[in-house]
Image (cartoon, rainbow, N blue to C red):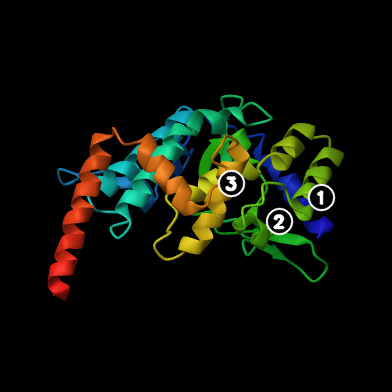
Amino acid sequence: MENIMSQVADAFIELEKYPFESMGSLRGPGEPVIVSFARESLTERVNEEVHAVGPCSSRKEYLKESIQLTLRLILRDEMYATREVDAYIIHLFLLDSIDAICSSQCVADDGHFYLKHADNKGDHILVDEDYNVTAIIDWEWAYTAPKSIAFNSPMAFFPVGDFYDGVTTSGEEELLFAQVLEAKGRPELANIVRSGRIQHHFAFCCGYDFITDWDGFLGLFKGLRRALGGTDGELDWDDWRKMALDRYSDDENLKALIGRQKENDRGDFARVD
């Protein structure tokens, strides 16, 4: 594993040599141009026109635009239709957490953006029988991201069970990968990996498909709240939900969603009768 990590670290170091000036997807052929994100979850249709998030000039801009898009889709009944109130308060919380998430980085972003693989679970790395990396494949959904995201630990090195259970500390393989980067003279990249768990938890919680994996989401969401600190980090879901409904009780859109849910519930009850 350490031999593979060493070669992945070399890839990180090479990618850092080619910064971009904005955050988004790449369009070719020829010299790559950064455009809006080529990702269905970051698009919406308005007046028969498709609009997408990006390109963005900062991570904060990207997070704000993408979460606000999710909130709009919830209100239009295009996302989380069976748990719209829960989804709305969750994403209000995520929106409110952006400043804390950006300030939690131990290494400040440098204003540039770097190519990031969009699906780095490990099956994108091809190795031979001697554990030499022969290729890193499946770059079609790659995008540019700030340094704190582009050079965070690949998911391939996650302790997956701990991650979904809400553990906020890095796993053994993540720490080993950080050591490998440090040994190659890149302490800045090593520190990004060591402190990156909160960034991963936040990214997973944004737009997570909890309709099909509610239990998985609860662990991730508790891990994020623990990492952010505050008084609600150890609350279970029901207690956190009550607190959030009170916190956002003045939000007019939330009031409308609650009213819509009550109407739906009454309709379901009438059909049962």
Residue 33 percent coordinates (x, y): 44, 36
What residue lies at 55% left-to-right and 53% top-to-bottom? 220
Mark 3: which secondary structure? Answer: loop
Tell me the residue that label 3 is attached to. Answer: 234
Q: Residues within 10 Å of mark 3 (few under 14, many from 20)?
A: some
Mark 1: which secondary structure? Answer: helix
Foreground mark, 1 or 3, reads: 3
Label 1 amino acid?
Leu
Residue 244 percent coordinates (x, y): 41, 41
The mark found on residue 176 in the picture is: 1
Can you say whether 218 is above or below 241 in the image?
below
Is any atom of residue 63 visible in this view? yes
Earlier in the chain: of badge 1 and badge 3, it is 1
Label 2 amino acid?
Phe
Mark 2 and mark 3 residues within 8 Å of each other at the beta carbon = no
Tell me the residue that label 2 is attached to. Answer: 157
Label 3 amino acid?
Glu
Q: Nearer the viewer, residue 218 or 77?
A: 218
Between marks 1 and 2, how big is the CA–CA gap?
A: 9 Å
Q: In this image, 230 relative to 79: left or right?
A: right
What residue lies at 83% left-to-right and 44% top-to-bottom? 179
Between marks 1 and 3, how big is the CA–CA gap?
A: 29 Å
Q: Nearer the viewer, residue 201 or 11?
A: 201
Mark 1 and mark 2 residues within 8 Å of each other at the beta carbon = yes
Mark 1 and mark 3 residues within 8 Å of each other at the beta carbon = no
Quadrant of residue 2 within the rendered picture: bottom right
Mark 2: which secondary structure? Answer: helix
Residue 172 percent coordinates (x, y): 79, 54
Q: Nearer the viewer, residue 18 or 226?
A: 226
